[in-house]
Amino acid sequence: MKPLLVLLSSLFCLAACSDDAAPSKGPRVPDAGADTTTPPRDGDTPNTPDATVASDARVPDPDVTRPPDSGDPTPRALVLPDDYIRSEQASHLVFELDAVAGIAPRAAAKAYVVDRLGAVADKPGGITWTTDGTIPSRGADHVWTFEELKVLARETYDLAVPATTAKIHVLYLDGSYETNSVLGVAWSNRHLVIFSKVLERACSQVLLSAQMCPAAESSVLLHEVGHVIGLVDAGVEMVTNHKDPDHGAHDSSDSCVMYWAYDGVGVLDVLAGRLTGASPELDFDAACRADLAALRNR
């Protein structure tokens, strides 16, 4: 494993080691993009940006009071995990996909997320993906700020769905993030971004890349979906304490896809040791599944 670790460390250090200003474990600050058509329900507390990065850095959102730039066509505010896991309000869950032309999640990654959520969520109407729109490319060299991501999410979060359908907004972008070698970002219990080119470039540099890239994409996508639905202790209450006290909304067990080290270099390193197995992709562990089962069966 040493050659792999050296190669991966060199790859990610190009960005991570030069970013002295970025906090290693910064605050998680809420987004202001609440639904303007329906007031949030009592107790709503939108979650905050989680960046899938090598150093687990967080970029604070300084603008938490400005109203959203555009309305949300969804009839209800989507800020609680209940809608994603329970069936009373929403019997169907849809992933609204907006992507740069030529960039899209692998069919295997989408199927993996549907399969893993199907095992923990009560959705008798099914879990599906809908490609909603094409995002103009800003170029491979564009560095996205969190403010830009928020504006883009508001502008593109426009798939009209019935009141019985919950939706998770997925953006696949080129370019990279403003802090370190970020693979994905999730915030407000509704939006997530995958920086596809960064992910593909990173996994293609390691041995067995043909197997590594699909497994890495599935794992990173599921990790960000996990944050959107309220893991760990970010809206979904824990049955037993398994939250990493040093790394925010992450699992303390390295057997879980929500483990903090799988934000960056760690996810590729651990997958390298799993590629010979039947299912190299990472999954929710027993503690996370217990949390989601308690919410589902409440």
Image (cartoon, helix red, strand yellow):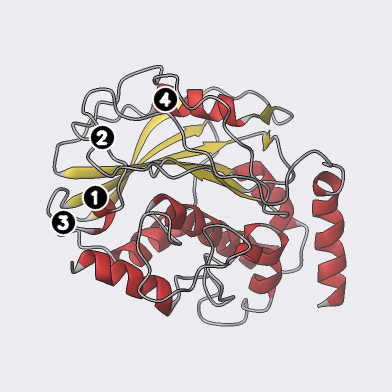
Could you tell me how far apart the alpha carbons at marks 1 and 4 are, in whole angstroms?
20 Å
Q: Can the viewer see residue 89 in this picture?
A: yes
- Left or right of 286 in this view: 206: right
In the image, residue 288 sits, relative to residue 205, either above or below, namely: below
Q: Work out whether 210 lies above or below 272.
A: above
Kindly indicate whether the residue at mark 2 contacts the one at mark 3 (C-beta within 8 angstroms). no
Q: Earlier in the sequence, mark 4 or mark 2?
A: 2
Q: Quick check: marks 1 and 2 in contact, CB under 8 Å?
A: no
**Label 1–label 3 contact, CB within 8 A:** no
Q: Secondary structure at mark 3?
A: loop
Which kind of residue does numbered mark 2 sit on?
Pro
Q: Which residue is mark 1?
A: 83
Q: Which mark is residue 154?
A: 4
Image x and y of residue 104, in percent: 50, 42
Residue denoted by label 2: 40
Front-lying residue, 148 or 104? 148
The 10 Å Cα crowd at callout 4, few under 14, some 14 to 19, many 20 or more, is: some
Are dots 4 and 2 in contact, CB under 8 Å? no
* Residue type at the position of mark 1: Asp
Residue type marked 3: Ser
| Distance from Cα at disc 4 to Cα at disc 3 | 26 Å
- Mark positioned earlier in the residue sequence (1 or 4): 1
The mark tally for this picture is: 4
Specify which label sits upstream in the sequence, 3 or 2.
2
Mark whose residue sits in front, 1 or 2:
2
Element carrying mark 1 = helix
Q: Tag 3 or tag 4, which sits nearer the N-term?
A: 3
Tell me the quarter of the image containing the N terminus: bottom right
Label 3 or label 2, whichever lies nearer to me, is 2
